[in-house]
Image (spheres, helix red, strand yellow):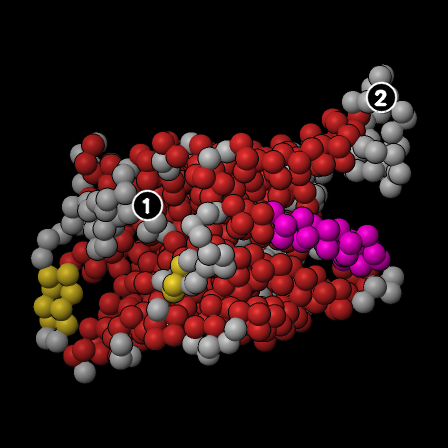
Amino acid sequence: MTYFILLTTNGLVIGLIYALMAAGLTLVFSVLKVVNFGHGSLYMLGGYASYYAINLLGVPPIAGVVVAMVALFLFGVAFERLVLQPMYTDKVERKDEYAIIVTFGMTILLTNLALVVFGPFSKSPPSFLQGTLIAGPLILPYDRLIASAVAIVILAGLAWFLARTALGQALDAVSQSRESAAVIGINPKRMYTIAFGLSAALAGGAGALIAPIFALSPDMGELPGVQAFIIIVLGGMGSVGGSIVGGILLGIVQGLGVGYLPDPNRALAYTQAFGALLLIVVLLVRPTGLFGRAHMRLD
Amino acid sequence: MSSHIKGSQVLQALLLLVAVAAPALIGPYWIHVGALAWYYALLAASWALLAGYAGQFSFAHVAFAALGGYGSALLTLRLGLPLALAIPLTLLIAMVLGALMGALVLRLSGPYLALFTLAIAEIFRLVLVAEEDITRGSLGLQVPGLFSGGSDVPYYYLGLGLVVLALLAMNGLLMTRIGLFLRAIREDEHAAQASGVNTTLHKIIVFVATSVIAAVAGIYYGHFIGILSPNMVILPEMGLVIAMAVIGGIESLPGAVIGAVVVYALSEILRDYGEWRFVLLGLALILVQRFAQNGLFPFIERILDRRPAAPPPASPVRGEGEYANPS
């Protein structure tokens, strides 16, 4: 039982990080109708941004998360303006392919730039708070506790922002129909930029939160990047709530899978393969996902 | 299509001549590099047919290469089949799985298709990693060579022959109505369907054809390099193939081949610069896509086809084969 609780709480922490990643990815999909194949590299960049903010600028570790989010927001805005905006003109014929290729190009560029600039060896930023919480059977390092708490705060903030603010509603309007949104005076292009920036900030925040728990490395974004794809399909492409639930579920299921299946090498491979299989089945059987919204369906 | 000889055709013939003559001029190291470049050329060209012509943006292409490599190796090593039987059997498996893939993704397009194929490739890779008893997992599976003697020259010519053969076969396919229908499906699937194109059949055909070529590439690679590992299927490897095809020209099969050779050769020439090469590759991918969507080769081709005419044409014509050479 203790083992079960331990695995579940560890899975929950990772699940919250996944949820942050997936919420950003799905936000971009719902507003821009683009799957960002470079989302994992934004997560990696966020981790390093926080690391250097803490080590070079001397900001406290928690503020490093904020710095990472702001830096990634700016990066996202710049990337969207410079590279994605031409998609909405007549210059680009096949928009889906264009978006996949440029975001994939961004991953190749950023991952290798990180290898050159930050070095191939893993780096660890300082803990948010040293020590471990021991409550009965539960053993939880404070780092994980704080990362989870901050992730919950960010996700709650995001949910509030999308549902309760004028800007959030405008984003939702564009996601439902960019023409209708334009008719009532919302500038879709501005919303695309904001959505992409926000998404990058969420990925960056996730990377900064995970940094003290696992070490930083240039390829750290690959696995969570793929997991985020699985989650957004599972949760329904474009549904932020679905991606949060999906992320937490996937984190827990994988945590338990690795803990209980015999043969660790196989368990690790097959828990990951299980996620990918889930994605395939969902796409084939129920392409709108578990929490899919009708207007996001395949056309 | 005009019956005149175009500048681009002259260029292609010249490049083929250079490729045939090259081993006499370059050292064994570069022959090795060239032989490896043919592997990527096969993948990039067949992926260009799949993604560029037919609009099926698949991330599972390298998985089919691994299927070919592992298939032929495992059939010979584990079941003791002779190579002459193992290779056709592997290609048959690739055809069946390619058809299955084509049938499964019928309703998926754009990002959905990309995610679907990415997941397929990922599962395949993870199975290769996990089933160590059969595939030897990350340790790598050793594969016997095809030719005795240590020289890479036979492989170089085998690879070149495969590339030429694949290009001819794919061009042949595109010359038929199938090529026309594939483009129609890419431009507007519903309109093509409404005009009487059997979209189901044609999607399956293109998946079968390109999967077989990818499997051939994988078989060639396995026997040439002598070791297979699940790393053939990792995402950066697929990214390399995509980058080669996009930079060379996603809608031009020879363009994709040239893209593959140039990118691979450059990555060897610039070896001293380490990871900077891939920074450059990512940047090139974004810039080409941003400013020359059809890739660099069609861009050069258009200039060459224009050259023989003394005065430049009054209005630039887009697309290939649109106007006859006035000479």
- Residue B187 painted magenta: yes
Amino acid carrying mark 1 in the image: Pro
Q: Whole-percent x and y of residue B55?
A: 68, 54
Q: Left or right: where does residue B326 sit relative to residue B184?
A: right
Residue A207 visible? The answer is: yes
Residue B100 position (above or below residue B9): below
Amino acid carrying mark 2 in the image: Ala
Instruction: Please tell me the numbered disc located at residue B309.
Output: 2
Report the chain holding disc 2: B
Q: Left or right: where does residue A274 sit relative to residue B17?
A: left
- The quadrant of the image that shows the C terminus of chain A is bottom right
Extreme residue in the front direction? B149
Q: Residues within 10 Å of mark 2 (few under 14, many from 20)?
A: few
Q: Secondary structure at mark 2?
A: loop
**Residue labelled with disc 1:** A218
Of residues B25 and B91, the one drawn nearer to the viewer in this rendering: B25
> Which residue appears at 75% of the width and 27% of the height?
B304
Q: Tell me the quarter of the picture where residue A93 sits.
A: top right
Cα separation between marks 2 and 1: 52 Å
Of residues A162 and B8, the one drawn nearer to the viewer in this rendering: B8
Q: Left or right: where does residue B76 sit relative to residue B311?
A: left
> Which residue appears at 16% of the width and 79% of the height?
A2
Extreme residue in the top direction? B311
Q: Whole-percent x and y of residue B321?
A: 83, 38
Q: What is the span of residues highlighted in magenta in the rendered image?
A: B160-188
Question: Are dots 2 and 1 in contact, CB under 8 Å?
Answer: no
Q: Secondary structure at mark 1?
A: loop
Q: Whole-percent x and y of residue A297?
A: 63, 65
Q: Main secondary structure of the magenta part?
A: helix
- Residue A125 painted magenta: no
